[in-house]
Image (tube, rainbow, N blue to C red):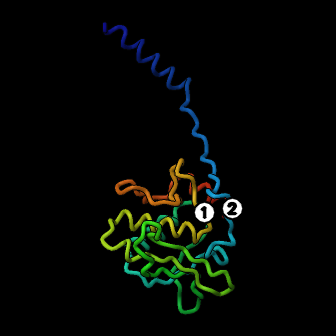
Amino acid sequence: MPHRSLPLLLAAVAFLTVAAPPPAFAAVRPAPCAGGVTETRGFSAVDDGEIRWTDKTGYDDARKHAISAWQYNGSKIKIVADSAITSNDLEFKDADLGTRVSDPLGRYERNGSIGATDYIIFNRQKLRGASKELLRYVALHELGHALGLCHKSDSIVSLMWKNAPSPGYEITWIPEVDKANYKKLWG
């Protein structure tokens, strides 16, 4: 290319850069629940804008990661450790929930009465020797339920799939669609 064309080319690139702004990204919309259920604050462990938690689990890294991730910039619900002067809303614990294919990796149990403790239960039998990524996925997913989120279709990228992803494809962050559902529920 001759040198005298270079200034023309640079001027054209500069014009196009100024004249054509980058495309705007559309906001991610909330996804519907799978199975015809509806997300609801009433199925959450949230009490007065927060979840007070206690811990009887050996999966501390997964618990810490999930709590930290769900406290992203813009999240409204505070997730804080229980203290001597507060009631715990949620307890992380471990149990043997079975080894069959149909048995869960973890489970959120809502107790529903005022002052009752809800539970996130890690299935020791299925999580023994599991990767750090899988443990973090389970904790994030179950804490999503404690925040009131429901299962989502496998056709979208969501932390809230009914079935865990294949090894190596675990979601260990909060996808934008889950943030959109959270925002729809909590503002």
Which dot marks residue 76? none
Residue located at (51% from left, 82% from top): 91
- Going by the numbered disc 1, the residue's amino acid type is Cys
- Going by the numbered disc 2, the residue's amino acid type is Thr
Q: Position of residue 66 (x, y in %)?
A: 46, 68
Residue 68 visible in this rendered orientation of the protein: no
For residue 177, side relative to residue 128 (left or right) = right
Q: Is residue 165 above or below residue 54?
A: above
Q: Which residue is mark 1?
A: 150
Q: Position of residue 6 (x, y in %)?
A: 36, 13
Give the quadrant of residue 116. bottom right
Q: Which residue is mark 2?
A: 38
Task: Between residue 122 and residue 57, name the one nearer to us.
Answer: 122
Quadrant position of the N terminus in the picture: top left
Residue 85 visible in this rendered orientation of the protein: yes
Q: CA distance from mark 2 to mark 1?
A: 7 Å
Q: Are marks 2 and 1 in contact (CB under 8 Å)?
A: yes
Total of numbered circles in the picture?
A: 2
The mark nearer the N terminus, 2 or 1, is 2
Q: Position of residue 80 (x, y in %)?
A: 53, 78
For residue 128, side relative to residue 147 (left or right) = left
Badge 1 element: loop
Residue located at (57% from left, 85% from top): 88
For residue 10, side relative to residue 24 (left or right) = left
